Amino acid sequence: MLRVGIDKASQYHNVGLAPEGQAPCSLRVPNDADGLQELLAAIRRLEPDPAQVHVAIEGSGQGLFVAALLAAGFRVYPVNPKAVDRYRDRFSPAGSKDDRRDALVRAEILRTDRHRLQPPRPSGPVCHVAGSSALQPHPVRSGSSPASGAKGRVALTGTIPSDRLSKIRTPTTGT
């Protein structure tokens, strides 16, 4: 079994990977399609069976990132940031916020309290996701500004219309 904790941010996501019986490791991926591909590849290298991958992610469990994790067959559990704050005290007496450590704390929450977590409920119709060697999310153009450098980039937050979700492709496993 692989436990994955994700601390989301606007530019990068910090990821804690905790394979059963091994020391945990960390990964930092950009909040874009390339980062999602990198994350999925790292997870599959450590645990090829998607049913054995449990992911604790910050927030409500909504958005393209979560949809892609669910489409890959992983079990995803949203974890309230306030809960992470309380668990953090078990790992660091100072309790200061550290995104890398918070990702590892989320992975640890899955080990100790997964039975208390609720998987997200779909907010729309469930769609089948085609398997392929490339992920092709839809670029978000509205609300982008040239000053932020976000124009034409892929946003991995928000909800996915069901007609677009069916077009998302996840990488196939390969060795």
Image: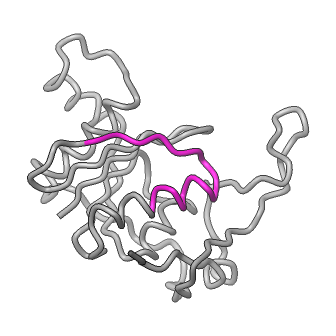
**Above or below 1: residue 108:** above
Residue visible at 10% across and 48% down in the picture: 112
Residue visible at 27% across and 76% down in the picture: 49
Front-lying residue, 52 or 113: 52
**Above or below 32: residue 71:** below
Would residue 115 be found to the left or right of residue 153 on screen? left
Part of the protein shown in magenta: 25-40
Instruction: Point out residue 68 in the picture as x, y percentages from the top left corner.
Output: 51, 68
Considering the image in quadrants, where does the C terminus appear?
Answer: bottom left
Residue visible at 45% across and 73% down in the picture: 122
**Residue 51: quarter of image:** bottom left
Residue visible at 45% across and 63% down in the picture: 40
**Above or below 105: residue 162:** below
Considering the image in quadrants, where does the N terminus appear?
Answer: bottom left
Instruction: Point out residue 43 in the picture as x, y percentages from the top left corner.
Output: 36, 61
**Colour mode of the rendering:** one colour
